[in-house]
Image (tube, grey):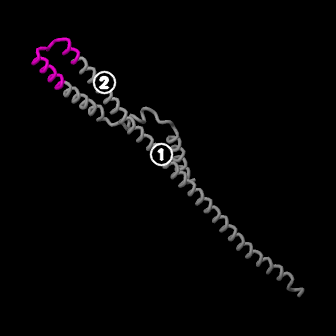
Amino acid sequence: RAYEPDLGMARGLTSLSMSPITQSDIQQYQNPYSQMVTKNVLDEMRRRSDIQGQQTSDAAVRSGAFGGARHGVQESERMRNLGQQQSQTAAQMRQQNYQQALAAAQAQKAQQLSGAGAFGNIAGQQMQLGQQGIQGLQQAGALGQGQLQKGMDIAYQDFLKQQQFPYT
């Protein structure tokens, strides 16, 4: 049964492709550098905010309002905006990485299902070839048996003729 390994492979791949996508399936496709990239982007956002904060502090010093209530409100608003912007950016980057990993995991499932179909087709073809081989052997056996029977029939007819020879 030459088809059994391919049939087993088709069953295994079908089983894999039909199982739900798990978090570990997705994690294996997540970009390992995304955390570093996200950190760099957030650090750059903080650096720019710090520059803006320094400019605001310089302006407050020039106007004599440094350390006042207005300067404190501006500083806390800048930090709140920075935190909000950093949260949104980090969430978008993580979502993008997740979506790419999910698409790759889904593509793997589709590829497994395609492979299962291919192995199933191969197993089916092997089964058909095996059946054709058996049919060929049956036909060859029937022809051989027919030829042998014809030889025996001729010998029997000769025997009967020899027995009837004295009477004819």
Count of number-bearing discs: 2
Q: In the image, which residues are magenta? A: 50-74
Q: Which residue is mark 2?
A: 84
Provide the secondary structure element on which disc 2 rests. helix
Q: Residue at x 14, y 18 (%)?
A: 60
Amino acid on which disc 1 is placed: Ala
Q: At which x and y percent is residue 119?
A: 51, 51
Q: How many C-alpha atoms fall within 10 Å of the one at disc 1: few (<14), some, or many (≥20)?
A: some
Label placed on residue 110: 1
Amino acid on which disc 2 is placed: Gln
Q: At which x and y percent is residue 26?
A: 41, 35
Q: Quarter of the image holding residue 138? A: bottom right
**Left or right side of 74 for 142:** right
**Residue toward you, 62 or 157:** 62
**Left or right side of 77 for 12:** right
Provide the secondary structure element on which disc 1 rests. helix
Q: Is residue 46 above or below residue 135?
A: above
- Secondary structure that dominates the magenta span: helix
